């Protein structure tokens, strides 16, 4: 086992499953023959999710897949759920409701096994709700296609795999710049990371690299000179000045310690 | 007549016409008993537009309204069209297609009369397409709810009432941060101004003040340290780093010469 944590693959939803599959390929390449656990916990009705990934990963030569689903929180410490992680090289959280992931497996034996797998070098991937849940504080809900109004974003504790960020997904597609900005305004210690559909941030250590067809937005509130979030009445639109935004596309990298982007190209590979 | 240009009221679309009408009130307050010209030129099918504004402004006590519509460019120099501007205190451009405004009245006698009215202190207001057309270079079209891809934004010369900015409307509602950023990336000399629905920027001289229920986004590319817009292939997502964004809500102001925001409150009134 490696003595440093494994990579995180944080996907903005709707990753391509039929054509180039560049994002799913990034998962397949990191299995080293180990088992891939498809965690469909986020879904209230998980039927069909596992089969869709089984087919997409099968086309990439990955055949050792198991589904991890827990109906009730009480099952998350059970032997059956824990056994799905035996021999696992990676866990892939599918979409649905991020609050289902955190409420059903947070602080259970299952969560500890997943965190241990990551700490030992295993890959943790998540798409849509599975992306949101990676951060310590996660965005649960808030209006899309609207500017942020005071009091409108709901946040909750996530799995904490990724420190000091708050993640949003389906980002440009659902017009979520306003809500991510609202989340960041609460405490600019958290860097806002908005990920488009069919786009992912592959995080190794504290460095991220973009893969996929869209963009990753990094919203840095450290430089902000004014915000009305603590003063204004509910329902009033947010004011915030001097926010630094980076838009990264395929191949670009981001250093989360230095909070700095560097440019790359589509063809860049690597660590 | 005043010896300095009149105000501009740049509206993000769907301004409230039934309740508080704060934006339409800002028009009504600046008429000083003069005539209000409702220019429905942007619309391919203008039926009903004038009547809707007639009703909304009527409720605010404004009764001297005329409609300005030109079916064909050839009409834009005609006596009938020019006569609608006699005694006018303000022109209000309604929504539709900004390219219809610029192509039908650009460089005609009608445009000169409107520019003269503004130069002499008259108010020029515009909502949606009528907002976009105010700048020298206007955004014509580009995808909403997507990150910007190289080559996807179409721009064209506007009426040039507002220098060094590019305006977008229905901003948060249609998820247009990506496309405005794409427009700004072409030449960061232009400041990007994105205006939400039921929200307006009232510009006097080179100072703007926000009114209405949503937000105004100012995207300043001057600080940008990298962009791939000139290098990347068509269809590739835009990368751009270190863009400064300001989100302004009701009462906040923006100094376009210094490119700086200042905070205000809902109750602030303008100079």
Image (spheres, coloured by chain):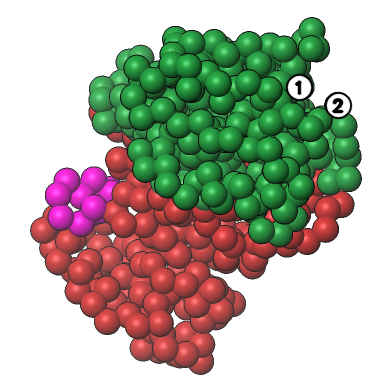
Chain colours: A green, B red
Residue B174 spot, x, y in % from top left: 45, 53
Residue at 47 percent across and 90 percent down: it is B72
Nearer to us in this view, B193 or A190 = A190
Residue B22 in the magenta stretch? The answer is yes
Q: What quarter of the picture does the C terminus of chain A occupy?
A: top right
Nearer to us in this view, A2 or B127 = A2
In the drawing, what numbered circle is on residue A271? 2
Residue at 53 percent across and 35 percent down: it is A67
With B57 as the anchor, is A210 left or right in this view? right
Highlighted range, magenta: B16-28
Residue A237 spot, x, y in % from top left: 35, 32
Q: What quarter of the picture does the N terminus of chain A occupy?
A: top right
Residue A149 in the magenta stretch? The answer is no
Dot 1 lies on which element? strand
CB of mark 1 within 8 Å of CB of mark 2?
yes
Residue at 49 percent across and 39 percent down: it is A95
Instruction: Report crowding for label 1: few under 14, some 14 to 19, many 20 or more residues within 10 A (C-alpha).
Output: some
Against A55, residue B216 (above or below) is above
Against A81, residue B96 (above or below) is below
Nearer to us in this view, A172 or B99 = A172
Residue A29 spot, x, y in % from top left: 80, 37
With A215 as the anchor, is B193 left or right in this view? left
Which residue position is annotated with label 1?
Answer: A204
Against A143, residue B59 (above or below) is below
Do badges 1 and 2 share one subunit?
A: yes
């Amino acid at each position: 086992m490696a003595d440093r944590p494994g990579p995180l693959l944080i996907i903005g939803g709707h990753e391509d499953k039929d054509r180039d599959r560049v994002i799913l390929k990034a998962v397949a390449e990191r299995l080293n023959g180990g088992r891939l656990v498809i965690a469909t916990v986020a879904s209230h009705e998980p039927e069909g999710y596992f089969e869709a990934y089984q087919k997409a990963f099968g086309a990439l030569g990955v055949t050792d897949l198991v589904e991890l689903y827990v109906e009730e929180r009480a099952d998350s410490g059970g032997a059956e759920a824990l056994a799905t992680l035996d021999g696992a090289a990676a866990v892939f959280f599918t979409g649905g409701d991020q609050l289902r992931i955190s409420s059903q497996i947070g602080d259970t034996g299952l969560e500890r096994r997943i965190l241990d797998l990551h700490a030992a070098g295993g890959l943790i991937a998540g798409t849509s709700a599975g992306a949101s849940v990676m951060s310590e504080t996660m965005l649960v809900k808030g209006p899309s296609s609207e500017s942020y109004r005071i009091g409108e974003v709901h946040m909750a504790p996530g799995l904490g795999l990724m420190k000091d960020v708050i993640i949003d997904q389906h980002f440009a597609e659902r017009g979520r710049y306003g809500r991510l900005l609202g989340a960041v305004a609460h405490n600019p210690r958290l860097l806002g990371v908005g990920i488009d559909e069919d786009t992912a941030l592959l995080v190794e250590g504290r460095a991220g690299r973009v893969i996929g067809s869209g963009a990753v937005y990094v919203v840095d509130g450290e430089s902000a000179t004014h915000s009305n979030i603590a003063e204004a009445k509910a329902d009033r639109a947010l004011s915030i000045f001097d926010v630094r935004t980076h838009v990264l596309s395929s191949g670009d990298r981001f250093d989360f310690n230095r909070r700095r982007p560097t440019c790359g190209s589509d063809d860049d590979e690597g660590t």
